[in-house]
Amino acid sequence: MRTVTRWIGDRFAMIAAILVLFYLFLPVLYTFIFSFNDYRKSNITWNSNAGPTLKHWENPCGAPGICDSLVTSLQVGLLATFVATVLGTMIAFAMVRHRFRGKAASDLLVFVPMATPEIVLGASLLTIFVQGFSQVGLRLGFWTIVIAHIMFCLSFVVVTVRARLQSLDPRMEEAAQDLYAGPGETFWRVTLPLVLPGIVGAAMLAFSLSFDDFIITNFVSGDTSTFPKFVYVSYLRGIPAQANVIGFSLFVIAVLLVVVGQRVASSRTSK
Amino acid sequence: MTTATAGGPPSPATDPDVAEGRRSRRIAYLLLLPGVLWLVVFFVVPVVQLFTVSLQSDYPGAPGYYYRDVNFSNYVDALVEFWPHMLRSLLFGALATFFAFVLAYPLAYAMAFKAGRWRSVMLICVIAPFFTSFILRTIAWRQILADDGVVASVLTSLHLLPGGRITETWVAVVAGLTYNFLPFMVLPIYASLERADPRVIEAGGDLYANGMTTFARVTLPMSMPGVLAGTLLTFIPASGDYVNAELLGSDRSTKMVGNVIESQFFKVPGGYDTAAALSFTLMAMILVLVFFYVRRFGTEELV
């Protein structure tokens, strides 16, 4: 008995961690299971009168509008990620590598959007889009979603890249300068490769934030639908199981990409 | 910064440090300009605009039409009517943050110190559920906690569920909030524990010779920056959320301020000013809480 309690005591953190991971995965498992549900009206409860079916997997675009919304989400995510990563990386470099007046103000300007609830961001953007931008011909839709996503991803990019830049060893760049590399060469061949993991991480974070955003998108999207918005709206009428198929497939694809990416990264560093 | 001292005052035009500083500053402004402009146009200006909306008045007898005004009674009216929602949001947000902390800490601790070569696998496991849309996962919670689902059935048969149901109660909403924002708590705590030198903890173990004391005196203080960032990253989105309350809660007793803002904006004619006033109150409350919280527990670098 004593050895059992000791064993548990030693492994308490690990056992708790595995239970928490199970808790994190439980809804993903449910999403998977309910993709086989042969339901009549609503995919909220399991239809035990019929067996599991593959028909939703055979035709993932079967629900009207679902694949259009998925494509919109991917387009918005890629565009917003690209712009936010470029602009955010520039800000991060300015903040870490340069001294300038107004530094405290720009720190605050980057921090406050992260501390503002999404619903307030969405409400204020909707206000300005409706009251100001519609006069210059910008209607609610694809581009207002992209603008909003760039805005809220930007701060997260700055914070991620800045952390990486701050942890860089300045001696690496000094060494390059000592070896007669010009400032441009130092930047492209030493600084940028060292910061790149931070930039890639920031871009991945930005994409996942954009792709999964519902609250801000719901405010600024007008009639345009993204994947989360499609799921939310269709929930009121009974969510189609094709959403489960697509949601679970995205999960598998993303995990595979991350695993492959890590393999490539670790094989490069071990070379 | 070093400046030339010997040989009289340096002339600003020729001193290389000053010229260098000016060049550096010019580059900094060029790097900052596009991003800062974006944040000013699409964050600062909209928030200011929302503030003016929160102060405007209705044309009497014409709902949906406003004129510019400085009408603070919008705030009074909104808070008199919706203070329970505001309070509930802060309470639910705080509860979800607390539960997320309790769940996240052992996981982050195990990842940082116990996982060994499983560390990166566990990290992927924490991030992976993100890729299934959070709306889909919240709907999955509705299925898990449903009246005829496993959890509710077991609890009912054990006579532990007096109301007979979990969905449509505050328990479901808080559970959903805890679940949805848990990774935002795990990742910063893990990051700060990972940076900690395990030898310091070993030394703590040698000095205090007691697991609990070492944890309280050494490990926990070292992870405080992560805990601070994690609680903010959980509390802020949780208290402003309306999806969980909408999908897991009921119409009457679990609506949060986010639900009110959303419905005042989209469904109630002439609700713009109320929605704007509530948005601003929520933002101000959160910023004040964050400010005092960071003041009280804060370190230099926050995130």
Image: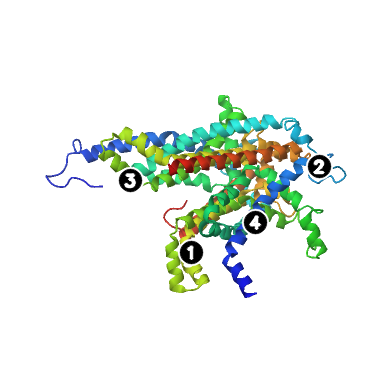
Closer to viewer: mark 3 or mark 2: 2
Q: At which x and y percent is residue B266?
A: 68, 39
Cα–Cα gap, marks 1 and 3: 29 Å
Cα–Cα gap, marks 3 and 4: 45 Å
| Mark 2, secondary structure of its residue | loop
In the rendered structure, the answer to whether residue A116 lies left or right of residue B175 reads left
Which residue is under mark 3? A170
First in sequence: mark 1 or mark 4?
4
The amino acid sitting under disc 4 is Phe
Q: Mark 3 and mark 2 in contact? Answer it, CB < 8 Å.
A: no
Residue ID at (75%, 52%): B144
Cα–Cα gap, marks 2 and 4: 37 Å
In the rendered structure, the answer to whether residue B242 lies left or right of residue B234 reads right
Is the residue at mark 3 from the same chain as the one at mark 4?
Answer: no
Q: At which x and y percent is residue B218?
A: 46, 66
| Mark 3, secondary structure of its residue | helix
Q: At which x and y percent is residue A44?
A: 78, 45
What label sits on residue B219 in the rendered view? 1
Q: Quadrant of residue A120?
A: top right
First in sequence: mark 3 or mark 2?
2
B209 or B90, nearer to the observer:
B209
Residue ID at (76%, 39%): A239
| Mark 4, secondary structure of its residue | helix
Is the residue at mark 1 from the same chain as the one at mark 2?
Answer: no
What label sits on residue B92 in the rendered view? 4
Which residue is under mark 2? A52
| Mark 1, secondary structure of its residue | helix
